[in-house]
């Protein structure tokens, strides 16, 4: 594996630095702000990218890669690391076809049961699928437009998948909602549904389920999901909601 240690990459006003070797348990991506202070990508990067309705997307898994990377919500400064299951580094059984990551300052509360889907949150920040044509960088922070959302139910937990597009993508100006995705990226929403439905099956697990009759819900619904999960996050961070999950709040 390539050693990328010590290389700073600048994204918006945040920089990410790689420590350790890729595809090892020591690999981490840490973040710093423009003043050089260490920051948490989950806690210290703002959710909103500006007053224009765009959001900050943190890319954990670049498109056409398979290493299952995630923000370590139980480690100080919540760096990006590769997920481990039963002592082994996790990989998807095949590449993911979109850039994948999270929205900062959001949290799917496992103590809150969603009234429509009748399941509780998965204890993670909200997942984001970015459908643009460019492979983004692991640890990059990108300004995105929100287009829609799927209500995935993974092992009895609600795991929203917000569909977005990078504002710098050539098609960004033409895509504002679910109907536009169908027009500009025909068949893409179905591909996303099938990918997330089936990716655990090669390991002998059942298909994931989806609420709302497998529909990709529109932009307005997605924005409500973001508002709700941002409110859950704020309660956790302020102490109004007890941190029974022992997450790192720094």
Image (spheres, helix red, strand yellow):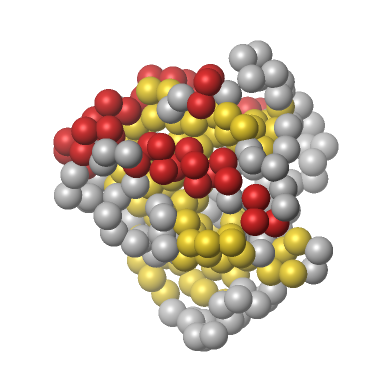
Residue 38 x/y as whole percent: 54, 63
What residue do we see at 62% from left, 32% from top? Answer: 209
Q: Position of residue 233 (x, y in %)?
A: 61, 33
**Residue 235, placed above or below residue 43:** above
What is the quadrant of the N terminus in the image?
A: bottom right
Q: Is residue 225 left or right of residue 204?
A: left
Identify the residue shown where x is 34% and y is 32%: 147
Residue 141 sits in quarter? bottom left
Q: Residue at position x 81%, y 63% from top?
A: 86
Where does the image place residue 66, in percent across and percent down from the top left?
Answer: 53, 64
Q: Residue furthest top?
A: 115
Residue 55, compared with residue 221, is above or below; it is below
Q: How many marks?
A: 0
Asked whether, in this view, residue 201 is left or right of residue 180, the answer is right
Q: Is residue 25 above or below residue 14?
A: below
Examine the rendering and report whether any part of residue 107 can be seen.
no
Q: Is residue 87 above or below residue 153?
A: below
Which of 160 and 241 lies nearest the eye of the viewer? Answer: 160
Is residue 142 left or right of 108 when viewed as pictured?
A: left
**Measuring 65% from the left and 77% from the top, which residue is drawn there?**
24
Q: Is residue 207 visible to us here? A: yes
- Please provide percent x and percent y for residue 78: 63, 56
The quarter of the picture where residue 174 lies is: top left
Q: Using the image as rendered, state which of residue 240 and residue 72 is in the foreground.
A: 72
């Amino acid at each position: 594996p390539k050693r990328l240690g010590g290389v700073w990459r600048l994204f918006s006003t945040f920089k990410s630095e790689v420590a350790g070797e890729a595809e090892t348990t020591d690999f981490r991506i840490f973040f710093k702000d423009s003043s050089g202070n260490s920051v948490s990508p989950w806690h210290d990067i703002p959710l909103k990218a500006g007053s224009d309705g765009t959001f900050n997307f943190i890319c954990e898994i670049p498109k056409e890669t398979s290493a299952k990377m995630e923000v370590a919500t139980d480690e100080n400064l919540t760096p990006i690391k590769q997920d481990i299951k039963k002592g082994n580094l996790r990989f998807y059984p095949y590449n993911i076809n979109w850039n994948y990551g999270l929205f900062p300052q959001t949290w799917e509360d496992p103590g809150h049961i969603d009234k429509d889907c009748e399941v509780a949150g998965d204890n993670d920040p909200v997942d984001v699928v970015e459908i643009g044509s460019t492979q983004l960088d692991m640890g990059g922070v990108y300004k995105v437009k929100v287009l829609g959302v799927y209500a995935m139910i993974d092992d009895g937990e609600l795991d929203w998948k917000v569909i977005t597009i990078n504002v710098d993508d050539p098609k960004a100006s033409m895509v504002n909602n679910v109907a536009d995705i169908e027009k500009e990226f025909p068949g893409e929403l179905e591909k996303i549904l099938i990918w997330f439905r089936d990716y655990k099956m090669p390991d002998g697990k059942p298909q994931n389920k989806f609420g709302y009759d497998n529909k990709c819900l529109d932009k307005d619904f997605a924005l409500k999901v973001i508002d709700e999960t941002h409110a859950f996050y704020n309660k956790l961070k302020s102490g109004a909601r007890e941190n029974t999950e022992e997450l790192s709040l720094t």
